[in-house]
Image (cartoon, grey):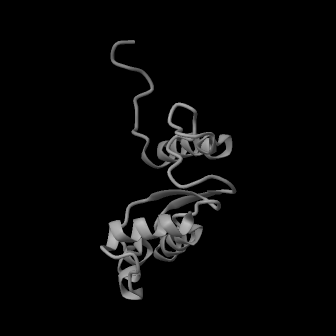
Amino acid sequence: MAQGLFRVANLSLFGTETPSEEQLLQASVARLVDDATPPTFIWATAGDKLVPVSQSTRLGTALAEAGIPFELHIFEEGPHGLSLATQATAAALTEVNADARQRVDLAEAWLEKRFTLSLNKKSNWA
């Protein structure tokens, strides 16, 4: 099953089921990190059979080396494409994952920490 997913993903992204090493390198997001890269929230599952977790760890390493703020969470289980990891977004029980669902709250907290607007103590109407 995983090999079939890789072939479809490769065909979709590269136009071939067997991309060259150069094509794979060109598609590496970690290679594109520079001083203009924004702060980044990354999450993945070690159980993802389509995108190896090493892609996320490489990106985290590249961000750290470039001094770009980031947060990285890797959950042990879960297939690719979990969306919200709730029954509301799942097509199958394998896509319902209480652990991975935490990433929504983690992302919200990270966004608030990074991008909270300054507010007055009191509104003009109070």
Instruction: Estimate the x, y position of residue 121 in percent, counting from the top left.
Output: 45, 26
- Total marks shown come to 0
Q: Residue furthest top?
A: 126
Q: Nearer the viewer, residue 56 or 50?
A: 50
Q: Nearer the viewer, residue 123 or 103?
A: 103
Residue found 44% across the figure and 74% down from its top: 30
The reply to whether residue 54 is visible in this rendering is yes
Residue found 40% across the figure and 29% down from its top: 120
- Occupied quadrant, residue 29: bottom left
Residue found 40% across the figure and 73% down from its top: 33
Instruction: Estimate the x, y position of residue 98 in percent, counting from the top left.
Output: 67, 40
Instruction: Estimate the x, y position of residue 122 in percent, counting from the top left.
Output: 42, 21
- 92 up-or-down from 73: above or below: above
Q: Residue furthest left?
A: 15
- 111 up-or-down from 76: above or below: above
- Left/right placement of residue 57 relative to residue 20 reads right
Instruction: Estimate the x, y position of residue 15 in percent, counting from the top left.
Output: 30, 73
Residue found 41% across the figure and 75% down from its top: 28
The reply to whether residue 36 is visible in this rendering is no
Which quarter of the image is occupied by the C terminus?
top left
Which quarter of the image is occupied by the N terminus?
bottom right
Q: Nearer the viewer, residue 83 or 93?
A: 93
